[in-house]
Image (cartoon, grey):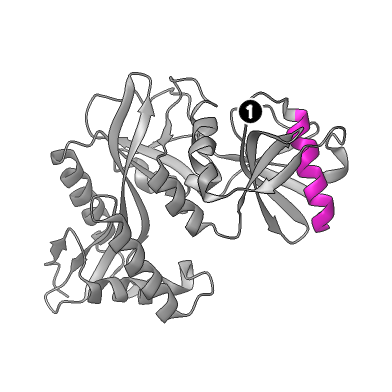
Amino acid sequence: MSDETTYLSELPAGAVEEHLEQTVALWGEGHPRDVRLRETLRELAAWGPQRLRLAGLIDGAGALVSSLERFGLRLQGPDGPVAAIGLGSIFTPEPERGRGLARRLIRLVMEEARVEGCSAVLLFSDIAPEYYEKLGFVRYPAQRWTVPLSSLPQAAPLETRPAADADIGRLLEWYESSFPASVLRPIRDLESWRAFRRKNSQSPDLVLLEDGVAVGYLNLARAPERLWINEYAPARLSAERVWATAARHGAEAGAAEMGGWVRLDPLPPAAALRDRPRAIPMIAPLDSCLELQGAVTHFDAIDHF
């Protein structure tokens, strides 16, 4: 078997289809293959290659032997925003494994991003983080919490309504104002917000209302026996009122438990913490613009790609 491969910075449609065929069992989420292909091609066209594209290695016969998704994004650092890329859906078919193809591909993409002026690469590890640490990535804390619904505050829940497209600008302002400027995190814009919401269409945003006035938002995801809080941004509310609001939705959904990723916000009373086995945020520097060691970071579940 020859180790000669060719790097494609942007996969053509046929190779995109091959990537989707190879990864449907892992990330197909139960969608028919033709639907997943159609939606992926639509997303690629809508975002454009600077925001989203697939890259990969092909062998001498033109077969796709390793591939990934590349996202264009920005990270907020202590000294301001920097250009970055995100990597996702990194995959090598079983017969091609053990040859270092994924490692080669990641290094090629990282070097390409560095030449383009990017300062960092972000990914969420679903396998052994040590693999990515050998490529220069720094691992950040990844925990989740759970709590019985009955342990949450119940007093003074807020009213909610589904967020409309016209609300997104305000939701984005609430989100961006939730963190000190020194926190290392992905920066969102209207385009990325809409795209990630389309990807998480089963978890619509809810606008929080106090006396009929919009004061923040909440994003929930229902699962058997549990309600997940993906994120929230109360502009001027106590966390207890957010928990009470989420508890009411959980009770209506018949959930016995609530959970979420550990954020910078206060945790609910009696929350139990566990390390997440997957979706571990990791960042590799491409220059000296970001101080990564010891940085205070924030990654929400909806940022996971």
- Magenta stretch bounds: 240-256
Whether the magenta-drawn stretch holds residue 25 is answered as no
* Secondary element type, mark 1: loop
Q: Residue at x 72, y 44 (%)?
A: 160
Q: Residue at x 59, y 28 (%)?
A: 264
- Name which residue lies at 63% across and 28% down: 265
Q: Is the magenta stretch mostly helix, strand or loop?
A: helix
Q: In this view, does 107 lie to the left or right of 76?
A: left
Between 184 and 270, the residue placed more toward the observer is: 184
What is the three-letter code of the residue carrying label 1? Asp
Quadrant location of the N terminus? bottom left
Q: Nearer the viewer, residue 166 or 58?
A: 166
Q: How many labels does the image show?
A: 1
Residue at 43%, 23% in the rendered image: 295
Residue 131: image x %, image y %? 37, 48
Q: Nearer the viewer, residue 241 or 101?
A: 241
The correct choice, above or below, for 258 with respect to 19 in the image is: above
What is the x, y in percent for residue 78?
38, 19
Does 26 appear above or below 208? below
* Residue bearing mark 1: 265
